[in-house]
Image (cartoon, rainbow, N blue to C red):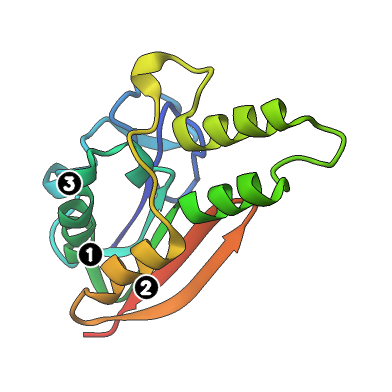
């Protein structure tokens, strides 16, 4: 029984998990880090092998046309009773924050609000090749995960412009 933690650039490493990072060249004895493609986990785990998969800030960096297929691939790796956790930037929450001027505190000017929105949505300020390709909303992720046969929605939350959706395999 495996637990996967999908990360980017060694950020968010967890002990007790297989940390999957397509960009890692690090070897750290404290963490199990595997260099692999998120889209094809067959080299790491078999179908129905995982008790937990965490995809924190991963879907935002995928090609938009691949997201649903890849989430279904991850779901196939979950065993009965196991959970799939998908976390990312909620585009609707960022849009509301920008529209209502709540992205930053009231002392910041409108230009700084737009900069904050761009940072959240596009990872602006980082390397251009490392930017987010698109963003989902809580409702979009619930829709995708809700369409998985044999899964039940356990949790859906938004906090600080980030959604978190948890589903459990029931059959």
Q: Residues within 10 Å of mark 1 (few under 14, many from 20)?
A: many
What's the CA distance linking mark 1 and mark 2?
9 Å
Position of 102 compared to 79: left or right?
Answer: right
Identity of the residue drawn at 22% across and 34% down: 36
Dot 3 corresponds to which residue?
66
Q: Nearer the viewer, mark 3 or mark 2?
A: 3
Helix or strand or loop: what does disc 1 sit on?
helix
In the depicted view, which residue is nearer to us: 109 or 105? 109
In the depicted view, which residue is nearer to us: 157 or 54? 157
Helix or strand or loop: what does disc 3 sit on?
helix
Q: x, y percentage for residue 110? A: 72, 32
Q: Is residue 87 above or below residue 82?
A: above
Q: Which residue occupies the extreme top position in the image?
A: 127
Looking at the image, is mark 1 or mark 3 earlier in the sequence?
A: 3
Looking at the image, is mark 1 or mark 2 earlier in the sequence?
A: 1
What's the CA distance linking mark 3 and mark 2?
20 Å
């Amino acid at each position: 029984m495996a637990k996967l933690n999908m990360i980017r650039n060694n950020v968010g490493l967890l002990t007790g998990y297989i940390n999957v990072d397509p960009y890692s060249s690090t070897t750290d004895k404290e963490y199990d880090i595997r260099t692999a493609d998120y889209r094809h986990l067959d080299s790491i785990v078999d179908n129905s092998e995982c008790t937990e998969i965490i995809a924190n800030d991963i879907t935002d960096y995928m090609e938009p046309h691949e997201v649903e297929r890849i989430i279904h691939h991850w779901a196939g790796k979950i065993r009965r009773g196991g959970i799939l956790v998908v976390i990312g930037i909620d585009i609707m929450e960022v849009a509301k924050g920008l529209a209502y001027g709540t992205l930053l505190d009231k002392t910041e000017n409108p230009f700084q609000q737009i900069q904050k929105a761009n940072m959240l949505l596009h990872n602006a300020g980082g390397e251009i090749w490392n930017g987010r390709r698109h963003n989902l909303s809580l409702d979009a992720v619930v829709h995708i995960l809700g369409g998985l046969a044999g899964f039940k929605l356990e949790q859906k939350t938004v906090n600080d412009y980030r959604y978190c959706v948890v589903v459990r395999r029931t059959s």
